[in-house]
Image: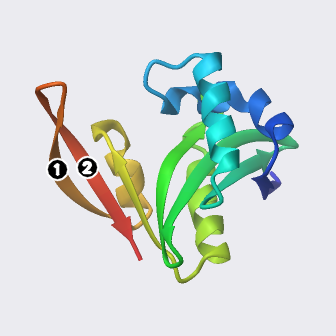
Amino acid sequence: MHRELLEMTTKNELLPLYNVYKDCMYLPNEDKYRKKVQSWLMDDWIRIFACVHDSKRKGLLVLKFTSTDQAEIIGISVEEGSRNCGLGSFLIQKVQEIFPDAKLNAETDRDAVLFYKKNGFRITEIQKNYNGETVTRYLCVKK
């Protein structure tokens, strides 16, 4: 079971990964994903990594640096058939090896809290207001 981390830097590498990333999006569709990819690639503060498992790209992590020593995970997803095999944890571990001084954070919903907790993140419940509705979110921080 061979795993490796690849940095994705082109549209041609990223566009075929819609099915890997779509569950990480609100109301996903391919056009919306294509626009996200374009904006990621134009932002010098964003780095994108794929987890290659058994010669296929099965996971994707999008990291946005907010300073030289702090980065937000703006998206992490593993294709549906490959979940619960450690690929998401592998992505976080490898990113931490590449950027050992970076404090990582993510904002997520209840579904992903246990994943972040398992990977050593401190979890804080926060309230956000979306269109007049209060929603519970979770801030996950790791250093």
SS assignment at label 2? strand
The correct choice, above or below, for 34 with respect to 92 in the image is: above
Circles 1 and 2 in contact, beta carbons < 8 Å: yes
Rounded to the nearest angstrom, the CA distance separating label 1 from label 2 is 6 Å
Residue labelled with disc 2: 138
Q: Quadrant of the C terminus?
A: bottom left
Dot 1 or dot 2, earlier in sequence? 1
The x, y position of residue 73, in whole percent, is 49, 54
Which of the labelled discs sits on residue 143, or is there none? none
Q: Is residue 79 visible?
A: no
Residue labelled with disc 1: 126
Between residue 117 and residue 133, name the one nearer to us. 133
The x, y position of residue 46, in whole percent, is 61, 56
Q: Amino acid at mark 1?
A: Ile
Total labels drawn = 2
Asked if residue 103 lies left or right of residue 14, the reply is left
The x, y position of residue 15, in whole percent, is 76, 30
What residue appears at the point 39 percent right and 55 percent down from the top-left corner?
106
Asked if residue 2 lies left or right of residue 107, the reply is right
Asked if residue 76 lies left or right of residue 42, the reply is left
